[in-house]
Image: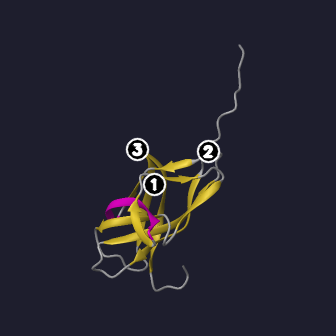
Amino acid sequence: MILLIAPLPALAELSIQQGYIRALPPSQPTTAAFMRLVNTGDKDVVITGAAASGAKTAEIHSHKHHNGMMSMVKVDRAVVPANGELVMAPGQYHLMLINLTKPLREGDQMRIQLFNGDVELVSAILPVRSVLNKHH
């Protein structure tokens, strides 16, 4: 019997670091989640969707500059490069959490999931932080 050993392709390893969700006044039905996505694998990771335990909808958004104006737009995908990172921060890529199921207070937590199609790539429990905190 001959056993052939072939190298397995390296898998993308995606992690969420330094993530948080912005706390806003209780009357606000929408907020944003920010994080650093780190890919330690040798293949790009494409994120095509998201979910959040405390929001009916989670969307990937980015900011675009057009005629001197900046606007926020939904994007269909975000790429975390191989052996690289994608920072989701105010004024950059971020997750919009739409139609919150309850008001968020500082200290609350919410589970965030990132997907490629129907495949969950990574999930994390993120803390809710006030926009007034200076540690962002």
How far across and down, in percent of the image, does residue 130 sit?
Answer: 44, 82
Q: Which amino acid type corresponds to the residue marked 2 in the rendered image?
A: Lys
Camera-side residue: 119 or 88? 88
Q: Which amino acid type corresponds to the residue marked 3 in the rendered image?
A: Asp
* Image side of residue 94 versus residue 2, left or right: left
Q: Residues within 10 Å of mark 1 (few under 14, many from 20)?
A: many
* 12 is higher (above) or lower (below) than 124: above
* 54 is higher (above) or lower (below) than 49: below
The residue most toward the top is 1
Answer whether residue 53 is magenta in the image.
no
Q: CA distance from mark 2 to mark 1?
A: 17 Å
Q: CA distance from mark 3 to mark 1?
A: 10 Å
Q: Which mark is residue 118?
A: 3
Camera-side residue: 68 or 83? 68
* Snapshot quadrant of residue 28: bottom left
Q: Which mark is residue 114?
A: 1
Q: Which residues are magenta?
A: 54-67
How far across and down, in percent of the image, does residue 135 sit?
Answer: 55, 82
Q: Describe the element under mark 2 as helix, strand or loop.
A: loop
How far across and down, in percent of the image, does residue 93 sit?
Answer: 49, 64
In percent of the image, x 54 and y 79: which residue is there?
136
In percent of the image, x 50 and y 67: which residue is there?
92
Q: Residues within 10 Å of mark 2 (few under 14, many from 20)?
A: some
> Quadrant of the image for the N terminus?
top right
Residue designated by label 2: 43
* Snapshot quadrant of residue 67: bottom left
Which of disc 3 and disc 2 is earlier in sequence? 2
Q: Which amino acid type corresponds to the residue marked 1 in the rendered image?
A: Leu
* Image side of residue 53 versus residue 81, left or right: left
* Image side of residue 40 versus residue 66, left or right: right
Which of disc 1 and disc 2 is earlier in sequence? 2
